[in-house]
Amino acid sequence: MRVKVILTTLILGVSMLPYSQAGSPEDLEDVGWVFGGVHVDANMSGNSTSNLSELPAIVEDYTATWCTNCVTVEDALNDVAGENNMKTYHFHRFINENEDPLGSQEGDDRWIARYEQRLPPTVIFNGTIMQMGSVSSEDGKTLQDDYNQNLARSIDLGIGSTSLGWAVSDGSNPVATWNLVFDNSKYPADSEIMSYLWVVEEVAYFPDGSNGEEYYHKSVRSIIQLGNSTTGSMEVILPDAYDGDDLQVHLIHEVVLPKEDIEVPAEQKEEEETEDEDDSSLPSLGLVAVVAMTMFAAVTVQRKQK
């Protein structure tokens, strides 16, 4: 029992380490596009509309206030922002987090559901390209080179538009209205589009993070699901800002791909269920955690043989 507790603690601790190795861009084939980005200030009524062809690339950055390698990544993203039409959203680690106060449960839940690993720093471009780590993918290249290359692979959203309305009144919650017009032939067959509000804090002052930064920009503080209707309205309960009064509301759309129906033999199902029961008492393991577990086991065996 004691060994199991130590092993579990070690896995959880190592899995929080920032990922600093070189990572080649990886195509994400099991999840659909992420697009949108029209937004309004949350503290006043407003409207925002854009043609789909003019929308920025959506860049999602998974980060933490203790992650020093994340600063390198975010500096590189800032460097390429001037020459690309892009919006960057920072998702701060939340689950099992002790130092970073800027994340959210729904943010981490979404990240796990779409991208599985929660290893900062990780950057996603348009929901279709993932690049992990803070080192360029090839010798002689920079992160800026990688990011420019990823951003050059734009998605063809076709003809259409997206719009967000925001009505603020005293004594009641604000009301969001949205409308999406798109050419269905441009999207994967049998897919659907889910719409969301990403509540974003423009800038938060947090000098207690150990990565040397004090101001954190464009932190996603909450995700509100609007559903698969292309038009509608909803009363919204906003989260509190970490500080100040600078929340924004961004309309984001996600293409949901149809799930493939794969027949699994009954014997294989029984084996998988047995494996799941055996593993249910341990947390899910990422690559770094697996290496840590292997090293721990090797040391333990070596001590027993002495």
Image: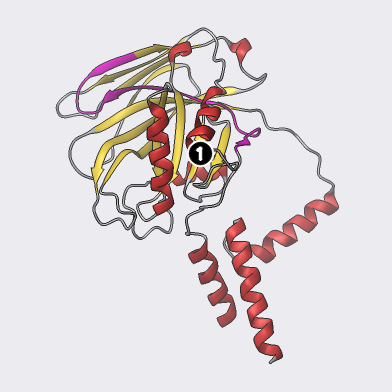
Residue in the picture at 46% in, 46% down: 108
Q: Nearer the viewer, residue 243 or 144?
A: 144
**In-image side of 155 versus 267 (left or right):** left
Circle 1 Cα neighbour tier, 10 Å, few/some/many (<14 / 14–19 / ≥20): some
Residue 47 position by quadrant? top left
Q: Is residue 281 visible?
A: no
Q: Is residue 141 above or below residue 184?
A: below
Quadrant where the image shows the N terminus: bottom right
Give x and y (percent) for residue 229: 48, 19
| Camera-side residue of 41 and 88 | 88
Residue plotted at (44% across, 40% down) = 61
Specify start and end residues of the magenta stretch as a single range.
25-48
Q: In the image, residue 179 lies at what x, y percent?
A: 41, 14
Name the one closer to the observer, 175 or 113: 113
The percent position of residue 127, horizontal first and vertical second, equals 54, 31
Residue at image mark 1 = 142
